[in-house]
Amino acid sequence: MKTTVDIPDSLLERTKIAAVRRRTSIKNLIIEGLETVLREELPIEPPADALARLRQGYHLGGQLLTRDQVHAR
């Protein structure tokens, strides 16, 4: 998705220099920065919750197969 961001000239200049030094694009620097900020802000799901969901399983549609039926395929 394309968007427009108003960045102060001094910050844009430093960003361009950083991108060249890292051999990447300004776009990639912005994506990395946003991912870092969001990763720190979003609560990490407790492993117990994730394991409980895995044990419950997911129904992805269609007919549920037994183990033997899966192996017969």
Image (spheres, rainbow, N blue to C red):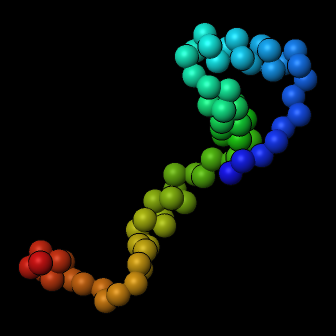
Foreground residue among 32 and 19: 19
Specify the farthest residue to the left: 72
Foreground residue among 5 and 48: 5
Specify the farthest residue to the bottom: 63
Foreground residue among 58 and 31: 31
Q: Is residue 56 above or below residue 62?
A: above
Residue 68 placement (x, y as % from top left) = 13, 80
Q: Is residue 7 above or below residue 18?
A: below
Indicate the quadrant where residue 17 lies.
top right
**Number of marks:** 0
Can you see residue 40? no
Residue at x 42% of width, y 80% of height: 59
Can you see residue 38? yes
Residue 70 placement (x, y as % from top left) = 17, 77
Residue at x 48% of width, y 65% of height: 52
Indicate the quadrant where residue 61 lies.
bottom left
In the image, taking residue 3 as reference, residue 67 lies left or right, namely: left
In the image, taking residue 10 as reference, residue 19 lies left or right, namely: left
Residue at x 71% of width, y 41% of height: 38
* Quarter of the picture holding the C terminus: bottom left
Q: Is residue 23 above or below residue 33?
A: above
Residue 19 placement (x, y as % from top left) = 64, 18
Residue 13 placement (x, y as % from top left) = 80, 14
In the image, taking residue 29 as reference, residue 58 lies left or right, namely: left
Q: Is residue 20 above or below residue 7?
A: above
